[in-house]
Image (cartoon, grey):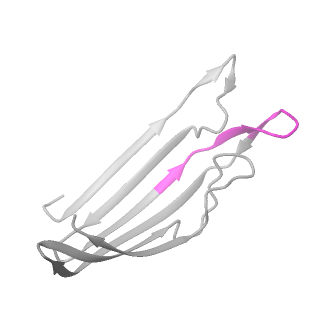
Amino acid sequence: LDRHLTVELTGTALDASTAGQPLPQRPAHEVMLAIDWAPRDAFDLRAELRHVGPARDLAPDGRLARLSPGTEVNLRGRLPVARIVKAPLSVTAAVDNALNGLVTPQLGLPLPGRTVRLGLMLGG
């Protein structure tokens, strides 16, 4: 949208079937909308909304089971705090699946719930 504000929209749609059977463990679609705000080199904030469409998987009895779609919100931040030689040192934070949504691309193995990470980044 401008030098410091970026909007991204990505997506995929999948229709892969064999003899009328959908491909297991593959969502019908995925869509992601991201907004990234990075004014100058002061800081960088990013928010992502990711929707994973319904999928199918084989149940223990061999039948196809329909898995519900799921949505997650991911947040990222970076704040430069110092310089080491000529490389910037930043504090980073990330929250994946901030709303703790249930995303199940396969039976019995949902994606992790809310995950929080803190770190340091040198360079970049």
Residue 43's place in the image compared with 7, above or below, is below
Q: Is residue 61 left or right of residue 27?
A: right
40 vs 45, left or right, is left
Q: Residue 11: x, y in percent?
A: 42, 42
Where, by quadrant of the figure, is residue 17 drawn? top right
Residue, far right: 61
Segment colored magenta? 50-65
Residue 61 sits in which quadrant?
top right
State yes or no: residue 91 in magenta: no
Residue at 33% x, 66% y: name it. 46
Q: Which of 75 and 124 is in front in this view?
A: 124
Q: Where's the C terminus, which quadrant? A: bottom left
Question: In the rendered image, which quarter contains the N terminus?
Answer: bottom left
Residue 65 in percent (x, y) is at 77, 40
Name the residue at the bottom extreme: 81
Residue 121, picture quadrant:
bottom left
Q: Which residue lies furthest to the top in this view?
A: 19
